[in-house]
Amino acid sequence: MADPLASTHAAIFEAANAGRHSEAASMAAAWEQEALRTAGPRSDEAIHWLEVRADLSRIAGDPARACELWLAVADARLGNGEPAEHPEVEGAVDRAHHQWQFVADRARAGALAPLLIELRGRVPGRRPGALEAVRRRAELLQAPARTR
């Protein structure tokens, strides 16, 4: 018997990879709402669909939204008592950090910086200097933009 969740994921990512980002996001949001309703906001199911939506935002080329969603995933996992060094927690913070580096809108990147700095302080990850890298970019974002 086929796994219905696997076919659901396949359909969602097929839509996203075909450029039908709104359709993919709507399908994932519907599944997330069902998980929230039946299992609760910090359930594994709800967190899973938050992760799916984060990945869909990345595919859609919206790194700011992907960063926000990965930050929410990390926060939910930490809120559930998962330790900072748990691979799923580290992965969420690493993905948020990675996506944040691609946020071109200075104001949006600057608004996300304090949240990322706070999480990086709690979840330093395995790569040395990650927190300092976020702090350096955050400082640059606060400096006046140079004109040509």
Image: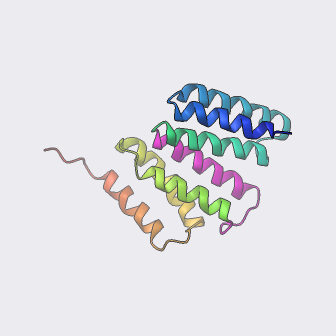
Q: Which residues are magenta?
A: 62-86
Look at 65% across and 60% down and name the residue there. 89
Up-down: is 97 above or below 58?
below
Up-down: is 132 above or below 116?
below
Residue toward you, 19 or 133? 19
Screen quadrant of the C terminus:
top left
Q: Position of residue 82 (x, y in %)?
A: 74, 62
Q: Please say whether residue 63 is one of the residues in the magenta stretch.
A: yes
Look at 57% across and 58% down and name the residue there. 93
Up-down: is 62 above or below 127?
above
Q: Is 11 placed left or right of 114 in the picture?
A: right
Where residue 23 sits, quadrant-wise, is: top right
Q: Position of residue 83 (x, y in %)?
A: 71, 66
Colour scheme shown: rainbow
Q: Is 15 placed left or right of 145 in the picture?
A: right
| Furthest residue toward left | 148
Screen quadrant of the N terminus:
top right
Look at 67% across and 59% down and name the residue there. 88
Q: Position of residue 26 (x, y in %)?
A: 63, 27
Q: Is 117 placed left or right of 142 in the picture?
A: right
| Furthest residue toward front | 1
Q: Position of residue 121 (x, y in %)?
A: 55, 66
Look at 66% across and 69% down and name the residue there. 85
Q: Is 19 placed left or right of 138 in the picture?
A: right
What is the tally of numbered marks visible in this picture?
0
Up-down: is 114 above or below 126?
above
Q: Please say whether residue 136 is one of the residues in the magenta stretch.
A: no
Q: Main secondary structure of the magenta part?
A: helix
